[in-house]
Image (cartoon, rainbow, N blue to C red):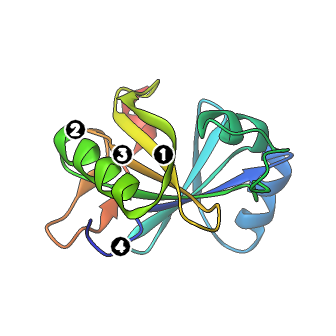
Amino acid sequence: MEQRVSLVTLGVEDLERSRAFYEELGWHGQEVEETVFFQAGWMALVLWSRKKLAADCGLTEEAPTGFDGVVLAHNVRSTAEVDAIIKHAKRAGARITRAPAPTFYGGYAGIFLDPDGHAWEVAHNPGFTLAPDGSLALPDFSASG
């Protein structure tokens, strides 16, 4: 697993309130299917419903690990890389909460928890460009709709 974070997803209670907050700070977001994406340098910050985020991770907000509403994502270039990293994480002691599988957005991903319960998504998303150095570039979502 390369040493990088591609996205940080924040589970929010009120998407519009959170988007307005970040835009007031000068950030420019793109909303797609009740999710707001902000390009943040070489990575992305994502706002999504806290309940949907927990469910997507195979968790509930009342999970014994105390789901904190934050998911770190490590994007990779192939589905085989997703499988290999999830297997490696399990051998290292991670708890797999969502086995690698196709996603609702047309990609492929799995989720594991580190020893302290922090959620990591390992994902292959063909719509997100990864540069050779691993930096992520969000697409222009307005061009696809």
CB atoms at circles 1 and 4 under 8 Å apart?
A: no
Nearest to the observer: residue 25 or residue 14: 14
Q: Quadrant of residue 53?
A: top right
SS at mark 2 in the image: helix
Q: Earlier in the sequence, mark 1 or mark 4?
A: 4
Q: Residues within 10 Å of mark 2 (few under 14, many from 20)?
A: many
Residue 53 got which mark?
none
Q: Quadrant of residue 38?
A: bottom right
Residue that mark 3 sits on? 123
Tell me where residue 88 appears, x and y as whole percent: 29, 56
* Left or right: 83, with 144 as reference point: left
Q: Which label's residue is closer to the chain start, 3 or 2?
A: 2
The mark nearer the N terminus, 1 or 3, is 1
User: Are the residues at dot 1 and dot 2 in contact (C-beta closer than 8 Å)?
Assistant: no
Find disc 4 in the rendering and name its residue.
4
> Which residue is pictured at 17% across the width and 41% down the height?
80
Q: Amino acid at mark 1?
A: Ile
Question: Which of 112/30 is in front?
Answer: 112
Q: Position of residue 7 (x, y in %)?
A: 47, 60
**Lower sequence index among marks 2 and 4:** 4
Give me the residue at 44% from left, 25% from top.
Answer: 145
